[in-house]
Image (cartoon, grey):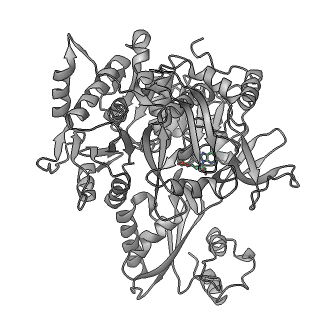
């Protein structure tokens, strides 16, 4: 057996779980032994949730790229590490072996070193889904630079804010990115983001779309030229190598920005050793990966799912990771099925929103596609409704493939609650059981553990974690206090997820959704305050309030109530202008689905917006608005109800 810590039966799961709780240090040290270390740890775990302060494998030294690449070369050097499927189906597929990946990552490491990047420097990566994105991420890790990948759907303003917050000194980007029939001018967006920026020294540009770009003298360089030069420097007898920098277990590996309930995205920081062990352990166990399997995670590397289950988890396991540049519905809604057929995909990991969208096209796009290679299906990002679950199970998995419903977050680094494919039972709509090392607890508003079952025999409350797992968030970049108040201060001595959940008598969990002011739109986290800030920047807008509403495909849609000074005669024109503003400030992903112009917002006497009421109206539950007597002006409510769109 290749992975000695792979769980193969329910009893093994129960034993591993028990041991991980009773003796976490022994448990995780027995897992960690199977990795490549430059120095062994002095202590497995030190922690308190008060500061918070968490250290895993303290004293150990390692480089994650040696675990993701070098250690596989002797046995799997000529096996595919990455299979790349381009946006255009007619374009050539690329297969990157572990040997080739090693060579490219070493070249990137040398290129970055040539340009002056040092250990600890923050490198922003804003690229489309090309293999070079994986090389860039791993090249940073090889030299100890902290990567911060920004999803290609964010605007120049969002990038500028992130560059500023991370004090990034280097950027790696592409001329453009292909997504469906669109060609997104990434470099030009970076140019806008850099107006007024004072920290960035160099921008490296990889050619993908051949979109014209303006290259600024002394700042912008071409990836191709730099990589060629790097190769000539480090090639000896046809072999290219670059030594992996020694990293401390707790040195930061990357920053990834995510939305919270405040107006400003947070830079979630993950460190090297714990993140490596966790993404590897969860990948192998949840998906029951077997060497040789082709794993297709449809996420973008710009999100945590791509970091953990396209790059680090699969590669650290010596797996074959399929990376797809395009979108599920272009050139038609059979694109995923063509890819599964063409590359004999064994594991498909996608989001409920994609399943619902494909479900809308019926069964025709699946016809004639050979899906018999599929063994395991997975979902992530949002609760999956039963209808979508059954469609996925019947039409895609042909009732032969276990579905894993994986619950986790950017802050958790990897999957925390999920069934194990084919080992522990799947329940439609339920993430089910905690992984070894994960100790969920449901609490009430005051932080007291829920002890009373409801009428259905369930426990219902806010989902928290009692103890750290190896990939827990370490800090929010540049502002540790923010990390504390966001996750560790709401309730004492636990990590608060921001999600609500149910637990049944079997100890299985069902995640019901966010309990804070964060929306989950197509599996993407968007803070309502961020959208409000963007809307409020539009001239003529006095105030706005944003809430979510149920959306058939996106899961949640964005509903904005907006007060304007002088509304244009043509309301729609103002609507379009506001959408344009939100696109500019955050990105197209944050555009409201509905904008209702109102004269006032329901507020308490102390001026707080009563979102509960706005949410109910957006959901269409007008009959049940609850107590409105504490409002400053109860009259606004009926006006809003009358004007609902
Ligand atoms: C939601 C994505 C229900 C949840 C990996 C969480 C889920 C947020 C599930 C994190 C699931 C993720 N079932 N809800 N299986 N997976 N979520 O940071 O609300 O982009 O807090 O990480 O997505 O989103 P993030």
Can residue 488 be seen from the camera position used here? yes
Q: Does residue 358 show up?
A: no
The correct choice, above or below, for 628 with respect to 51 in the image is below
Residue at 60% x, 29% y is 44
The image shows residue 404 at horizontal and vertical percentages of 64, 34
Nearest the eye: 165 or 562: 165
Q: Residue at x 21, y 36 (%)?
A: 223
Q: Is residue 227 left or right of residue 373?
A: left
In the rendered image of this protein, does residue 505 appear above or below residue 444? above
Q: Is residue 500 above or below residue 304?
A: below
Question: Quick one: 380 or 386, which is closer to the camera?
Answer: 380
Query: Where residue 627 sits: x, y (%)?
Result: 75, 80
Where residue 493 sits: x, y (%)?
A: 69, 50
Residue 470 appears at what percent x and percent y? 58, 35
Q: Give me the residue at 34% from left, 55% from top.
A: 159
Query: Which of 410/82 is in front?
Result: 410
> Quadrant of the rendered structure where residue 326 is?
top left
* Numbered circles on residues, count: 0
The extreme left residue here reads 217
**Picture quarter with the N terminus:** top right
Residue at position x 35%, y 24% in the image: 244
Which quadrant does the C terminus fall into? Answer: bottom right
Left of 36 or right of it: where is 230? Answer: left
């Amino acid at each position: 057996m290749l992975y000695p810590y792979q769980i193969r039966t329910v009893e093994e799961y129960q034993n591993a779980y028990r041991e991980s709780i009773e003796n976490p240090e022994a448990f995780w040290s027995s897992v960690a032994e199977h990795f490549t270390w430059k120095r062994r740890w002095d202590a497995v775990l030190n922690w308190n949730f008060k500061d918070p302060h968490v250290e895993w494998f303290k004293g150990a030294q390692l480089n994650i790229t040696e675990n993701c690449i070098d250690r596989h070369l002797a046995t799997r050097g000529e096996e595919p590490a990455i299979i790349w499927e381009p946006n255009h189906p007619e374009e050539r597929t690329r297969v990157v072996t572990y040997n080739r990946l090693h060579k490219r990552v070493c070249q990137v490491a040398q290129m970055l070193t040539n340009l002056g990047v040092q250990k600890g420097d923050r490198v922003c990566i804003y690229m489309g889904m090309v293999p070079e994105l994986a090389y860039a991420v791993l090249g940073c890790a090889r030299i100890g630079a902290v990567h911060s990948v920004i999803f290609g759907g964010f605007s120049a303003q969002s990038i500028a804010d992130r560059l500023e917050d991370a004090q990034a000194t280097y950027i790696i980007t592409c001329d453009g990115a292909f997504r469906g029939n669109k060609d997104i001018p990434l470099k030009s967006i970076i140019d806008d983001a850099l107006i007024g920026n004072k920290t960035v020294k160099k921008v490296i540009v990889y050619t993908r779309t051949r979109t014209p770009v303006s290259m600024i003298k002394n700042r912008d360089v071409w990836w191709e030229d730099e990589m060629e030069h790097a190769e000539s420097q480090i090639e000896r007898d046809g072999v290219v190598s670059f030594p992996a920098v020694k990293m401390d277990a707790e040195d930061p590996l990357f920053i990834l920005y995510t939305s919270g309930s405040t107006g400003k995205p947070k830079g979630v920081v993950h460190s090297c050793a714990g993140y490596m062990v966790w993404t590897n352990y969860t990948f192998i166990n949840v998906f029951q990966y077997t060497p040789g399997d082709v794993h297709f995670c449809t996420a973008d590397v710009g999100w945590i799912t791509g970091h953990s289950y396209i790059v680090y988890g699969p590669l650290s396991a010596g797996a074959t990771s399929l990376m797809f540049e395009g979108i599920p519905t272009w050139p038609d809604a059979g694109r995923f099925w063509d890819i599964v057929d063409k590359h004999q995909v064994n594991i498909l990991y996608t989001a409920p929103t994609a399943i619902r969208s494909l479900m809308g096209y019926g069964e025709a796009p699946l016809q004639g596609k050979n899906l018999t290679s599929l063994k395991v299906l997975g979902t992530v990002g949002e609760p999956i409704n039963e209808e979508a679950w059954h469609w996925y199970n019947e039409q895609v998995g042909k009732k032969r493939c276990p579905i894993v419903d994986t619950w986790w977050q950017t802050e958790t680094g990897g999957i925390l609650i999920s069934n194990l494919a084919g080992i522990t039972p799947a329940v439609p709509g339920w993430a089910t059981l905690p992984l070894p090392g994960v100790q969920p607890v449901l609490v009430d508003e005051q932080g007291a553990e829920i002890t009373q079952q409801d009428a259905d025999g369930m426990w219902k409350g806010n989902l928290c974690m009692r103890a750290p797992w190896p990939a827990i968030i370490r800090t929010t970049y540049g502002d540790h206090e923010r990390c504390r108040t966001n996750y560790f201060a709401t309730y004492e001595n636990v990590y608060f997820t921001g999600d609500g959940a149910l637990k049944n008598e079997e100890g299985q969990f069902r995640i019901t959704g966010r309990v804070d002011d964060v929306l989950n739109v197509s599996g993407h986290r968007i803070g309502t305050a961020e959208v409000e800030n963007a809307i409020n920047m539009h001239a003529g807008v006095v105030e706005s309030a944003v809430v979510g509403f149920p959306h058939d495909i996106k899961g949640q849609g964005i509903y904005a109530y907006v007060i304007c000074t002088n509304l244009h005669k043509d309301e729609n024109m103002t609507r379009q202008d506001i959408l344009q503003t939100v696109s500019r400030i955050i990105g197209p992903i944050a555009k409201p689905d509905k904008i209702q112009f109102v004269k006032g917002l329901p507020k308490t006497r102390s001026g707080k917006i009563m979102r509960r009421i706005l949410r109910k109206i957006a959901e269409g539950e007008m009959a049940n608005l609850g107590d409105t007597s504490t409002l400053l002006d109860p009259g606004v409510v009926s006006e809003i109800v009358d004007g609902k769109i």
